[in-house]
Amino acid sequence: MTFRLHNLSPVFFKLILKENTQFIRYFTDIKTYNVLFFGSDNIALNSLRRVNEFRKQESIINRLDLVTANTSKNKSIIEKYACLENINTLRWPLQSLNPGEYDIGLIVAFGHLIREDILKKFPLGMVNVHPSLLPRWRGAAPIIYSLLHGDQITGVTLMKIKADVFDIGEIISQQEVPVLKDIKLPELTEQLSKIGADMLVECLKHLPQSLQNAKPQSEEGVTYAKKINKNIGSVKWSEMSAIQVYNLYRAIYGLYSLKTKFKDKEMKLFNAFLYDVDEVEHSDIPPGSIQYCEKSSSIRILCSDRKYINFKSLRIVGKKEITALDFYNGYIKNIPSTNRNLLIVNTL
């Protein structure tokens, strides 16, 4: 038996085109995509720049536009870049997005939930770059929590967006990154953002297969990185070990300072480091004891594990930042040596 395919009515093709533009594009094997990028800060800029470079180099991205949530009259750094590159910028929340107008959405450091009605308008869905090895550190501050908890391995996850929830979508790809013991928040953030940008481009190169191979997240090892505020910098000397204080310093570096209380005044602590030579000479010295260490030219403070953390400079709030030596000369030197062990810093 032989089947013969007769000409279909042009009206039928118009109907298909009207109802599902993307079906026609994929059916005819057109491998170009309209991309809508969601991002608002410097971390997102690395990815937008990398995707835009890829757009210029390859013929895979047909159109690239940007969505930001900037409410200021002044343009953000990512908006300035978009303007220079002739990338059209849309404002969040999106008021008039047509179904199928963009094939895929890319989200990097955007911070807003994606509703189902928005997600459905992208035939290929939406992809998010998350700077942790999900399901570890779901939430707003994954890099901070990785450093805060002394993680030796972190990484980047590329995942599908699931409507109305954060960080539980299917995993497209992951890359592990070792955490150097002295690396701080800005450096690790920059490192992970560059890796995430490259992963995003790799995903785009292999659409739609990279999306089809996504796998559900594990139900084991789930942790949360909730949003932080400036109070996180207050050190609890009687509860925190020296390494915990140092990890806190690394985790919030560039955002907030470590802070404590000295002689009823708030004091901020800078340029922290651990000095292995430091040892506790008297077991009766309480956590929070503050001394000057000549060997390291630093102020050292005793922690709950009987080890010290050292600081190169300090500042009493209301006064300028001074070196550890200047602090010693101004606040410790004139106190009789027999009473110096009584100098204590306290939690705010």
Image (cartoon, helix red, strand yellow):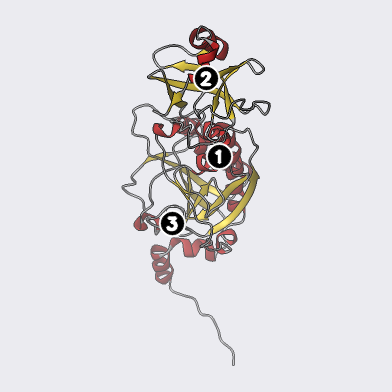
Left or right: 38 in relation to 195: left
In the rendered view, tell whether residue 157 sits above or below residue 283. below
Q: Please, is residue 156 above or below residue 230 in the view?
A: below
User: Distance of mark 1 from mark 2, alpha carbons?
Assistant: 32 Å
- Name the mark nearer the viewer: 2 or 3: 2
Check disc 3 and report the residue beneath it.
Answer: 122
Amino acid type indicated by mark 2: Asn
Residue 132 spot, x, y in % from top left: 55, 47
Residue 119 place in picture, x, y as percent: 40, 56
Q: Earlier in the sequence, mark 1 or mark 2?
A: 1
Report whether residue 55 is seen.
no
Look at mark 2 in the image and give the residue it sits on: 341
Q: CB under 8 Å between callouts 3 and 1?
A: no
Q: Which residue is mark 1?
A: 147
Residue type of the residue flagged with mark 1:
Leu
Determine if residue 153 is in view: yes
The residues bearing labels 2 and 3 have C-alpha atoms spaced at a distance of: 65 Å
Measured from the top left, where is residue 173 in percent x and y? 59, 55
In 3D space, how far apart are the residues under numbered discs 3 and 1 (Cα atoms)?
Answer: 35 Å
